[in-house]
Amino acid sequence: MYYAAYAARPTDAAVFSFRLRHAREERGMSQTALAAGICSASAVSRWESGRSVPTGAVIARLADRLGLPTEVLTHRDFDSRLLAVGEGFGDLVAAAFGADRIPGEDSPMARWISRARRVADQADPWSTGPGPRPVVDDLAVDPLTASSPVSLEAVELLDAMVRVRDSPSRAAVDTLTDTLTWTAQAPAVIRQAALDTAVAVLVSAEMPVAARDSVTRVTPPGITTTTAVLLTWDGSSADGLPPVVTARSARDVAFSVLARVRDTAAEVRRPVVAAVVASCPDDGLVRQWAERTRGTPG
């Protein structure tokens, strides 16, 4: 993929491939258009896959065509204080996604986290409001993103989630699942949301076997209540599924209630379903499953 292997810090190839791809796609350019008169399209593909890095002269020409300073692609020559962040920033990212308030809210790191959290909130295909594509593209070229494995993997995963929101196709979900298999250092909250998204899109498309296969491929230590309910909605056994995590979101609570009342009498079920929808007014997935529950015979 675009990540390339690295230990403590991202490699130059990983950083360059990540930024080149995002800069090109943000401008709506094909690999052929970017390469014209500079190199071959296959060379651009090779660089975007992280297999190699072009010479400085070629990077300068690519940056010029993209309308960017060269250092945006190379991550060199930005604020030297950011270079010292290293794993400390990764720790902060991991901690902040489990906190209500971001420490040091006026710092570059806090602003990065705030934007990442906004993308995580808006990447859901069933969320309301504007799509987060511009924000995730900005994060892709932010110097802090390349400063730690945690932040780089977080943005790769957020990008894959936004692609599903933009086009909730089987191919996009497969890419999201693939990304989940190698972004183990991304914050757990993002990973859980990404797996929820993959499972929900597939189950909504009447592909429960594919949804369960996504969980098998990712092998998470635990799944949310939402994912557990979706995977067993058709009567399938929960045997073989990872344990359900104890922390629950408003969506998790809603799905838990819907699962409990789906087989009750209509006069009992329908008022409860209406209350569930009212409790999550902006959650399109809850609304979709509430409609299924409301229409259950009984």
Image (cartoon, rainbow, N blue to C red):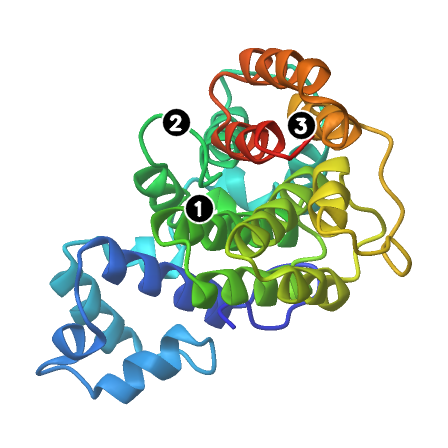
**Mark 2 or mark 1, which is nearer the start of the sequence?**
2
**Element on which disc 3 rests:** helix
Name the residue carrying label 1: 143
Name the residue carrying label 3: 96
Measured from the top left, where is residue 43 in percent x and y? 30, 86
Label 1 amino acid? Answer: Pro
**Element on which disc 1 rests:** helix
The image quarter in which residue 48 lies: bottom left
**Element on which disc 2 rests:** loop
87 relative to 289 in the view: left or right: right
Q: Residue furthest left?
A: 37
Measured from the top left, where is residue 294 in percent x and y? 59, 27
Q: Between residue 95 and residue 173, name the one nearer to us.
A: 173
Q: State yes or no: discs 3 and 2 in contact (Cβ < 8 Å).
A: no
Name the residue carrying label 2: 128
Q: Between residue 216 and residue 192, name the one nearer to us.
A: 216
Measured from the top left, where is residue 151 in percent x and y? 58, 46
**Mark 3 or mark 1, which is nearer the start of the sequence?**
3
Cα separation, mark 1 vs mark 2, equals 29 Å
Q: Is residue 96 above or below residue 58?
A: above
Q: In which quadrant will I find the C terminus?
A: top right
Q: State yes or no: discs 1 and 3 in contact (Cβ < 8 Å).
A: no
Q: Between residue 282 and residue 65, name the one nearer to us.
A: 282
Q: Is residue 76 above or below residue 228?
A: below
**Mark 2 or mark 3, which is nearer the start of the sequence?**
3
Residue at 77%, 25% (x, y): give it: 264
Label 3 amino acid? Answer: Ala
